[in-house]
Image (cartoon, rainbow, N blue to C red):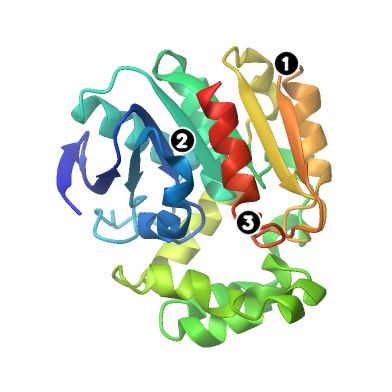
Amino acid sequence: MPKIKAGMLTINYETFGEGEPLLLIMGFGMPGRAWLPRLPRFGGFKVIIYDNRGTGDSDKPDQPAYSIAEMADDASNLLRALDIQRIRICGFSMGGMIAQELTLRHPEQVIKAVFGCTTAGGESAQMENPGGGDPLRMASFKLLATDPDKAYEELLPMLHPAELLELRPELRRDMLDAIKTAPPTPEITYVRHWAAIMGFNAYDRLPQIRCPVLIVHGDRDIGTPIDNAYILKRRIPHAEMLIVPGAGHGLESAQPNWVSDQVAAWLRG
């Protein structure tokens, strides 16, 4: 993946395909290459993936916490460095928070936006563990830095419903196969990203969004329950919604490729 100076940081990014530019924004602690299994579904776009600060080969600023606003500005600076004036964006989970903030902070850059399995943040956020206080879950996140196989085994119930894991055991290896091609995420990054998530709050500002928005959510998501999707819809009345039956936080798992195909079709429209 090439690197480019974007604002104060050096950002690691990669492009795939030809067509209208599309920025895919990865979530909590994951490098951009975690998008690789989904890229074939986005034909007709010039897809840009990149490593958020603290992940992959992007810079890892030494500060107590990161913020969603900083990461949104990183994305905006990357687009400016690449001389891209306007773009479609899609972010899942923490990436959906970054996508919200990018749309709010830099509306002139965003043509259309997809917010997937995410929350408006603040007191409105409906989370599995209100206040972020589950030390066992955070221990699993930190374990991703040293023993990703064990960590994913512990985190799988949040990502996928149990009956789905029985039907599709390959889900245990798909994400690992993708992210193992990138440098491991340092343990401290998970702490900094979690602080960003807990400090995020776009609730009061969401009605300012004017571009077309698609909200995507699994109806079996226990990590970020589906109530969050309805909160986003109430705050962005013109937004469209796509509810994925049987899907947990790992949106693609219940109906392989269907979500990406629906999202890609909406972005092309």
Q: Find residue 23 and report its horizontal and vertical position in percent.
A: 40, 36
Pointer 3 or 1: first along the chain: 1
Q: Secondary structure at mark 1?
A: loop
Residue at 29% across, 70% down: 183
- Pointer 2 residue: 69
Q: Amino acid at mark 1?
A: His
Q: Find residue 91 and report its horizontal and vertical position in percent.
A: 52, 42
The 10 Å Cα crowd at callout 2, few under 14, some 14 to 19, many 20 or more, is many
Left or right of residue 259, residue 26 in this image: left
The 10 Å Cα crowd at callout 1, few under 14, some 14 to 19, many 20 or more, is some
Residue 135 visible at all: no
Q: Find residue 261 and report its horizontal and vertical position in percent.
A: 58, 42
Q: Nearer the viewer, residue 241 or 125?
A: 241
Residue 56 versus residue 176 in the image, above or below: above
Residue 13 versus residue 249 in the image, above or below: above
Residue at 41% across, 84% down: 146
Q: Amino acid at mark 2?
A: Ala
Q: Which of pointers 2 and 3 indicates the residue nearer the eye?
A: 3
- Pointer 3 residue: 252
Q: Find residue 63 and report its horizontal and vertical position in percent.
A: 34, 55
3D distance between C-alphas at marks 2 and 3: 27 Å
3D distance between C-alphas at marks 3 and 1: 25 Å
Residue at 51% across, 72% down: 174
- Pointer 1 residue: 238
Residue at 30% across, 17% down: 85
Q: Nearer the viewer, residue 31 or 130?
A: 31
3D distance between C-alphas at marks 2 and 1: 24 Å
Q: How many marks?
A: 3
Q: Amino acid at mark 3?
A: Glu
The 10 Å Cα crowd at callout 3, few under 14, some 14 to 19, many 20 or more, is some
